[in-house]
């Protein structure tokens, strides 16, 4: 008896589409079942912006940069106000009140950045904040040291 050798040639099965069709049907079944549980939005209340005939220019907010030096000198937008030893700071307060009134008249915001040097006295910083309170300025941020 002669033994026959088993052929070990690779068999090319080809592309099997039946498992892919099964997966598609399972996914389709899942979405059909889940479609009933989705709630539809019936009413969304939001307003669309209307077109104005008048073109309104949008102005950026007024920005003030207040620097408090170590010796107590207060500068606003690189302009010095009052003497270093003056606690009330009438010129600085008047300038802030004028800027605040102008911004309110225009419907504008005033953004203030107080930049105090590291060795500036806390008393002088409080004096500046009191002047801003008199001018009714509320949007104030603080930084310390050099920019």
Image (cartoon, grey):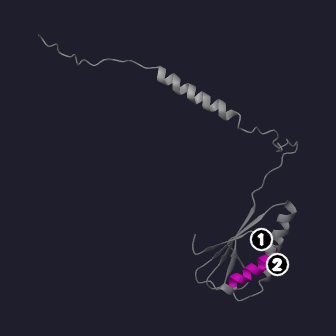
In front: label 1 or label 2:
1
Look at the numbered disc 1 and give the secondary structure of its residue.
Answer: loop
Q: Position of residue 121 (x, y in %)?
A: 64, 86
Tell me: residue 56, above or below residue 137. above
Q: Which residues are magenta?
A: 124-135
- Report the residue that reaches farthest toward the left: 1
Q: How far from the left and from the top, in percent, is residue 15? A: 42, 19
| Main secondary structure of the magenta stretch | helix
Tag 2, which secondary structure? helix
Residue for point 33% across, 17% down: 12
Residue with the mark numbered 1: 138
Q: In the figure, residue 143 lies in which quadrant?
A: bottom right
In the rendering, at what x and y percent does residue 120 appear?
A: 62, 83
x%, y% of residue 50? 85, 42
Q: Residues within 10 Å of mark 1 (few under 14, many from 20)?
A: few
Q: Quadrant of the N terminus?
A: top left
User: How far is disc 1 from disc 2 in space, using C-alphas?
Assistant: 10 Å
Q: Residue furthest bottom?
A: 85
Foreground pick, 123 / 65: 123
Nearest to the observer: residue 40 or residue 122: 40
Which residue carries the number 2 mark? Answer: 134
């Amino acid at each position: 008896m002669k033994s026959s050798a088993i052929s070990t040639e690779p068999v090319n099965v080809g592309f099997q589409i039946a498992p892919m069709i099964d997966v598609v049907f399972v996914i389709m079944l899942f979405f059909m079942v889940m479609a009933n549980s989705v709630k539809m939005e019936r009413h969304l209340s939001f307003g669309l912006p209307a077109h104005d005939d008048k073109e309104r220019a949008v102005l950026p907010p007024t920005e003030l940069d207040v620097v408090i030096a170590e010796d107590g000198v207060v500068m606003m937008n690189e302009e010095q106000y009052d003497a270093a030893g003056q606690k009330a700071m009438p010129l600085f307060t008047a300038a802030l009140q004028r800027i605040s009134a102008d911004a309110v008249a225009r419907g504008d915001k005033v953004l203030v950045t107080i930049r105090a040097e590291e060795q500036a006295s806390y008393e002088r910083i409080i004096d500046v904040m009191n002047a801003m309170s008199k001018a009714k300025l509320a949007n104030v941020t603080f930084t310390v040291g050099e920019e």
